[in-house]
Image (spheres, helix red, strand yellow):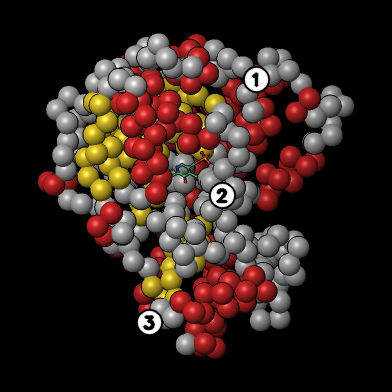
């Protein structure tokens, strides 16, 4: 593990034995959650076994999953007419599950605002080729290099679409759409990297899905929140494990679920409740993002290209005006104990992912480093 802190880095008091980690995913988890899991790893509830070693259908384990769902429902204020599923295959498998469950001979509208929504439509197109329905690109932000979203007046929206898909937070491009677009079709949002980061009105959505490894817990779990009237439309080609209605009937246990990831997600929900819930963490998230963007904007050394109204509060990409210094920035930041600031290979530069479990103090350490780096090399 890299030394932390070094002499030039301010003291990291929040969790002195933990290194500030800005990984985009799998991402930082709350220290207290990891400590809790560690404390009962070998002897869960005094049973002499770990939670990983018990039947997913046992009463004791089901108590964990029931509680995790109840907590998530309460944190997000999920209405009763929505099912909550805890499945496997990550967010990416949902790119297939969505057309297989919902296309139903109709049209699927897709908005492309970056890498992830681009992958979603690409995958959906395969089902169009199979004759399951039509896939329609409503608009793309490609012309702006995904730094902006085309105006809704220019969108090619289908009449009576089966659904409208978009990505609420483009993790790679750092572009976030804070309110669901005003379209008539049931809205499906990929919230992998922004779920639980600020309050949203679930009733505006037909379905929300999120891979867990950004803002919830470890990899291996994808959460699906789907309105009940969207169930029962699946193609006969839809694998049972991807069939929302089937999985809802089976309480996400059609086969063995990712039991340890589910358990850890439940602990993260407990932690989030202790932080005051989504509204409280949302305020801190805004402070973290404001601090970072202000540092970028106040300098002529750093740059973030995203249109102000779409700047992500979870993933902040930035470039150095002199990109020949990128390598030096990454090497020196790591030396200073600030980990995983390399931008995605598709966009280059740097990226700080500042999910719920990243404390404001870590962002302050990063900003202090950035200012010192600019002084030294600017
Ligand atoms: C990470 C991510 C994905 C892919 O998640 P996997 O769990 O790796 O399939 C999809 N969409 C968004 C917005 C992401 O951030």
Labelled disc at residue 25: 2
Upstream in sequence: badge 2 or badge 3: 2
As helix, strand or loop, the secondary structure at mark 1 comes to: loop
> Farthest residue in the left direction?
153
Residue 198 x %, y %: 42, 47
Mark 3, residue position: 300
Residue 205 located left or right of residue 374: left
Q: Is residue 194 above or below residue 320?
A: above
Residue 88 x %, y %: 56, 29
Mark 1 Cα-neighbour bin, 10 Å: few <14, some 14–19, many ≥20? few
Image quadrant in which you'd find residue 220: top right
Q: Residue sitting at 33 percent across and 32 percent down?
A: 125
Q: Residue sitting at 49 percent across and 66 percent down?
A: 350
C-alpha gap between disc 1 and disc 2: 24 Å
C-alpha gap between disc 2 and disc 3: 29 Å
Residue 232 located left or right of residue 268: left
Mark 1, residue position: 256
Mark 2 residue CB less than 8 A from any atom of ligand 1: yes
Q: Nearer the viewer, residue 365 or 214?
A: 214
Q: Residue sitting at 20 percent across and 52 percent down?
A: 150
Q: Nearer the viewer, residue 212 or 265?
A: 212
Residue 344 visible in this rendered orientation of the protein: yes
> Farthest residue in the right direction?
48
């Amino acid at each position: 593990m890299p030394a932390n802190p070094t002499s030039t880095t301010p003291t990291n008091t929040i969790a002195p034995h933990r290194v500030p980690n800005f990984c985009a995913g799998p991402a930082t988890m709350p220290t207290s959650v990891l400590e809790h899991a560690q404390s009962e790893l070998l002897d869960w509830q005094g049973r002499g076994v770990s939670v990983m070693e018990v039947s997913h259908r046992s009463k004791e384990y089901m108590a964990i999953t029931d509680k995790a769902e109840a907590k998530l429902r309460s944190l997000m204020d999920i209405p009763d007419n929505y099912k909550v599923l805890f499945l496997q295959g990550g967010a990416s498998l949902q790119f297939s599950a969505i057309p297989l469950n919902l296309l139903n001979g109709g049209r699927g509208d897709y908005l492309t605002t970056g890498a992830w929504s681009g992958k979603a439509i690409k995958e959906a197109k395969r089902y169009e080729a199979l004759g399951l329905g039509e896939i329609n690109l409503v608009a793309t932000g490609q012309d702006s290099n995904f730094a902006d979203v085309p105006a809704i007046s220019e969108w090619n929206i289908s009449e009576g679409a089966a659904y409208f898909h978009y990505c609420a937070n483009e993790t790679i491009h750092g572009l976030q759409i804070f309110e669901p677009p005003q379209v008539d079709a049931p809205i499906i949002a990929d919230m992998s990297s922004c779920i639980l980061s600020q309050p949203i009105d679930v009733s505006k959505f037909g379905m929300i899905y999120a891979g867990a490894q950004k803002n919830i817990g470890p990899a291996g779990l994808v959460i699906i929140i789907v309105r009940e009237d969207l169930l029962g439309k699946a193609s006969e080609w839809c694998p049972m494990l991807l069939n929302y209605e089937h999985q809802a009937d089976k309480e996400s246990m059609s086969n063995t679920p990712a039991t340890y990831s589910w358990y850890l997600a439940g602990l993260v929900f407990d932690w989030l409740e202790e932080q005051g819930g989504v509204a409280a963490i949302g305020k801190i998230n805004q402070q973290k993002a404001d601090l970072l963007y202000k540092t970028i904007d106040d300098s002529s050394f750093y740059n973030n290209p995203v249109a102000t109204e779409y700047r992500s509060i979870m993933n902040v990409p930035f470039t150095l005006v002199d990109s020949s210094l990128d390598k030096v920035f990454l090497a020196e930041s790591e030396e200073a104990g600030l980990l995983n600031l390399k931008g995605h290979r598709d966009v280059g530069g740097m990226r700080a992912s500042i999910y719920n479990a990243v404390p404001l103090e870590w962002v302050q350490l990063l900003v202090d480093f950035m200012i010192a780096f600019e002084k030294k090399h600017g």
